[in-house]
Amino acid sequence: MLRSTFRWMTGLTNMDESKPTTPESGAPSSSEAPITPDAIEVDNSHTILLKIATLYAERLMNDICLVVNGIEYPAHRLILCASSDVFQVMLMSPQWTESQESRVTLQETPQCVPLFSEFLRYFYTGQIRISYEVVLPILSLADKYNVRDLITLCLEYMQNHIAVAAINGTLVSWLEYTSNCGHREITQICQNFIKWNIELVTKTTDFGNFELDVLVSLLHQSSLVIRDEMTLYKCLESWLDYQSNRLRNQLSPEEFESTLKQLVIAVMTPIRFPMMSPRQLADLLLSPLTKKYKEFFVERMAIGMSFHSGQHARVREVIKNEEDGALLFEPRLYTVDTCSSLLTIENFQSLPSYHTRTLVFSSLSFLAEYAGDRTCEWVVDLYPKGVWFRRYLLIVWQGTVEMPEHVIRSVRLSLTCKDPPVDSDVDMRVKIGVLIYGLQDGVEHIARVTEVIHRFNKKECVLNLDDLLPFEELNPQQGVLSLDSPVSPYLVGPNKDMLKLHIVISPAN
């Protein structure tokens, strides 16, 4: 009787017993439902997720309680282990005492405590609210418990809202945390934003949170964008003021003075005093910081004056004997008028394909004062919507060759030196920077930088820079004008219809 009942419940018959179905027979496997031609896929995942979320919201059938800062959070071992590698090890490994406990106390930082409830709710719902204010503690919790999908969501949010973090004073903290935790990609993005927009970042309170080693590493970079070296000096003065106010109440007077002096020397040593003008160096003598640490600053300023007065032996000595001494005589990407010019294209969407915009400007031929104020004239041709080569005839010694028309889908900048050295054997070595602005969350900033060192001479006086921007990102729907057309993140202005570039050209000493 029992055997007959089992056959009826499982659908087995005598025929089933005598001729079992196998994959080789072509019949459907007993573990698979038959698929008919009119079958449709039904997605009721939302309802299932709602049922799971209800378990957390109404605290049903919980088998463990997490305690954070005295607050109890009833939970389910199955959900915790499925969501977190750390919880899986903690609650399923016998060597961990927590695996035998029904009540587990967790130690969280003060920033993470208020967000733990939202963090735990994410395990059940897959939903969480992220903003520039809370993304860092949420990421910290996700890292601590190795919730991989939430880590990815936080890093994507940070990448897409980095400009907001900068103006609201959290970007330096983002950089410090991601650098310490090994999130290299977002760390690099934060570093680039800061070094390309350092003047914007220094105006926030978060700038004072820069750790010394990270700040010094930034100061050694020649790709840092700043108006001039004096502006960078003043930015560091504000950082030192912040450190002074922070340390004054933490240390004894002797320890305070000693620590502050070490900080001054550490951050001011990478400052490129030779890149300041003699007038700026003279103005530094009146700075309170210079008066207080006169011996150190006079020595650094003397290096700058040696450069401007043409004392080449002294310059070579500094390069040879000082660590990274050569960097002191290398210009950064200075946006001062003597080294750069702005190029803008308004009504960009209306610009026809293959059209060019031209800019003519002059920059200093030498940065050292003894060389005078000679300048070099440059012609910049920008092709933001591709380059079109018309069909033409090429005359060679064998005869005439017809060259077909050709189109390059590239954002090209062509730079022509109008004043190359007269001697054909002499090169003029310059540092070129193309700073491209972008718009993110309404914040205009430098979003992309192309930097090259190039030699111009009488025979080679033109440099073509291709792929300044990904062509499709600048021209997402070239030739299509409609209200629904996507807008490039590299277009700025009130109507998001302006392409804005800064061309920087400095003599590479």
Image (cartoon, helix red, strand yellow):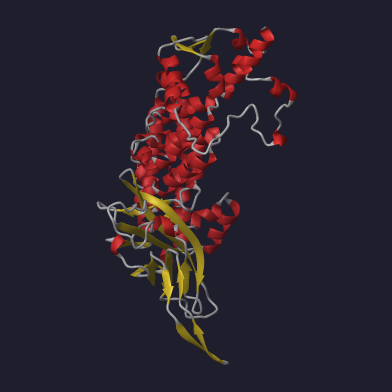
Q: Residue furthest left?
A: 494
Question: What percent of the width, then of the height, locates residue 204?
Answer: 34, 37
Residue 128 seen in the current view: yes
Of residues 441 and 250, the one nearer the viewer is 441
Q: Residue at x 60, y 52 (%)?
A: 321
**In percent of the image, x 55 and y 17: which residue is there?**
78
143 or 507: nearer the viewer = 143
**Count of all numbered marks drawn on residues in the image:** 0
**Relative vertical location of residue 121 with respect to residue 311 in this rendering, above or below:** above
Q: Quadrant of residue 20?
A: top right
Above or below 399: residue 258: above
| Image: 170 above or below 351 | above
Farthest-out residue, front? 15
For the N terminus, the quadrant is top right
The quadrant holding residue 479 is: bottom left
In the depicted structure, whether residue 69 falls above or below residue 470: above
- Which residue is nearer to you in this view: 468 or 109? 468
Q: Which residue in the rendered view is the most extreme toward the right?
A: 18
Percent of width and height locating residue 162: 40, 41
Answer left or right for 81 relative to 384: right
Residue 346 seen in this snapshot: no
Q: Is residue 321 left or right of residue 348?
A: right
Residue 450 in percent (x, y) is at 46, 58
Write down the quadrant of residue 22 in the picture. Answer: top right
The image position of residue 55, as x and y in percent, is 45, 15
| Relative to 103, 349 lies left or right | left
